[in-house]
Image: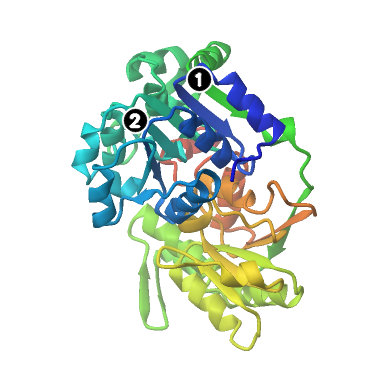
Amino acid sequence: MGVQLYPYQAAQLDASRDFNRVAYYHDMGLGKTFTGAEKAVSYGLPILLVCQKSKIDDWISHFRQYYGLTPFNLTLKRQYEEFFGTVGLFVGIINYDLIFRREELRSLKNFTLVLDESSCIQNETAKRSKFILKMQPQNVVLLSGTPTAGKYEKLWSQLHLLGWGISKKLYYQQYVEMEWIEDQGSGFRIPHVTGYKNVDRLKAKLAAHGAFFLKTEDVLTLPKQVFIPIETAPASCYSRFMKDSYMEIDGREYIGDTLLAKRTYARMMCGHLNPDRVAAFRDLVDSTEDRLIVFYNFTDELQAMIHALMNVERPISIVNGKEKDLTAYEESADSITFVQYQAGAMGLNLQKANKIIYFSLTDRSELYEQSKKRIHRIGQETTCFYYQLLCPGTIEEDILATLQMRKDYTDELFKAYHEKQHG
């Protein structure tokens, strides 16, 4: 047992030796799991680790393999009860969606709190964030490859955990540029972030409070990334739906009576409701016997793709909200692994593959950036190819352009600002 760290990981631990609250904001693929676990164990206190549900088993395996510890899975009632009667160095692991339902955890003292993907608490008004911000750990370790998704205004809750006592109002006044845009629907004025100020001072403050940023290009030379658009026309009903906000397909009504509903159904008419898209996906699969990773959004997309591969004899793995089975990926060089963004864009190590197919694009910048890193990480030795299935002249072009600016397409404030600027 024991952890063999890369030199840059050891350097980060050395630089953060005197901090009892630290954030390792390291690019995806730089092994922050190892750095963060080593730091947490070094304190010698009980550890409470909060992560996404899909990562619980991975963290349990990590502590068992490298430290000889058997963590408590706090999602299980019996292990949760045993956790409170244990002394010494031990680890409890729970997911973000459950922690605020475990009120007893708020009474913990003299422990180390580890937040994996700490960007999950960037909304300080969410129940999970409120609960965590009221905890009283002795030490804190934050881990994230995209702590703000490029948005400094979303750092405040994490800075609070690092011990920076600045109020949110003052933080915004000193570091965030704002403007107010009148919402034409409600008549209310909406705040919109236009940029940042005093950035050098902000970075100095972050460093003083234990935030350590590390970019891939600073420490590693990873293979080239190649992005290949695969263009098809949208479904024939797309234009009519965008005009009328209504369409019936195979007995199902699609009613775009809200902006969100219209966008969602428009994306579907570019995706699984589009025979040309499904055919293009099948053609890509037929073009290679290599491992493939396929990212998708909707359950209906997965069903359409599985149906398109009915007579294709290749092993399949699936990662979504209902299942996580990577057996085919691990064991078969010609496997196809379907990954739903929400369930698998963060945290999975898929560098046995070097090809990703985007059957559809996510509308969240953080998930898009993280998805690319599933194959472009330590251990990857060959060029990474990203096949983006797109319908030109549709909502998908807008989504891709927004993601390339590292913006969320769902960000209505950005949308309003963009429309104002380009009238």
Instruction: Tell whether 377 sits left or right of 236.
Output: right
Query: Within the image, what quadrant is residue 102 found in?
Result: top left
Residue 423 in sight here: no
Q: How many marks?
A: 2
| Residue 119, position as x, y percentages in the image | 45, 37
Q: Secondary structure at mark 1?
A: loop
Q: Is the residue marked by circle 1 packed among few (<14), some (14-19), or many (20+) residues within 10 Å?
A: many
In the image, residue 41 sits, relative to residue 264, either above or below, namely above
- What's the residue at 73%, 30% (across, down)? 218
Identify the residue position indicated by label 1 in the image. 210
Can you give x and y, in whole percent of width and height, for residue 108 in the image?
Answer: 25, 33
The answer to whether residue 178 of the structure is visible from this angle is yes
Query: Badge 2: how crowded within 10 Å, few (<14), some, or many (20+)?
Result: many
Circle 1: residue type: Gly
Q: Nearer the viewer, mark 1 or mark 2?
A: 2
Is 211 drawn above or below residue 70 in the view shown?
above
Q: Determine which residue is flagged by label 2.
A: 111
Proximity of marks 1 and 2: CB atoms separated by less than 8 Å: no
**Quadrant of the rendered image containing residue 392:** bottom right
Return the residue nearer the eye: 298 or 324: 324
Q: Amino acid at mark 2?
A: Phe
Q: Between 4 and 272, which is closer to the camera in this rendering?
A: 4
Distance in Å between CA atoms under marks 1 and 2: 18 Å
Q: Position of residue 81 (x, y in %)?
A: 22, 49
Which quadrant of the view contains residue 332? bottom right
Out of 190 and 4, give the one closest to the viewer. Answer: 4
The outermost residue toward the bottom is 311
Q: Secondary structure at mark 2?
A: loop
Of the numbered discs 1 and 2, the one sitting upstream in the chain is: 2
Q: Position of residue 82 (x, y in %)?
A: 26, 49
| Residue nearer the viewer, 147 or 297 | 147
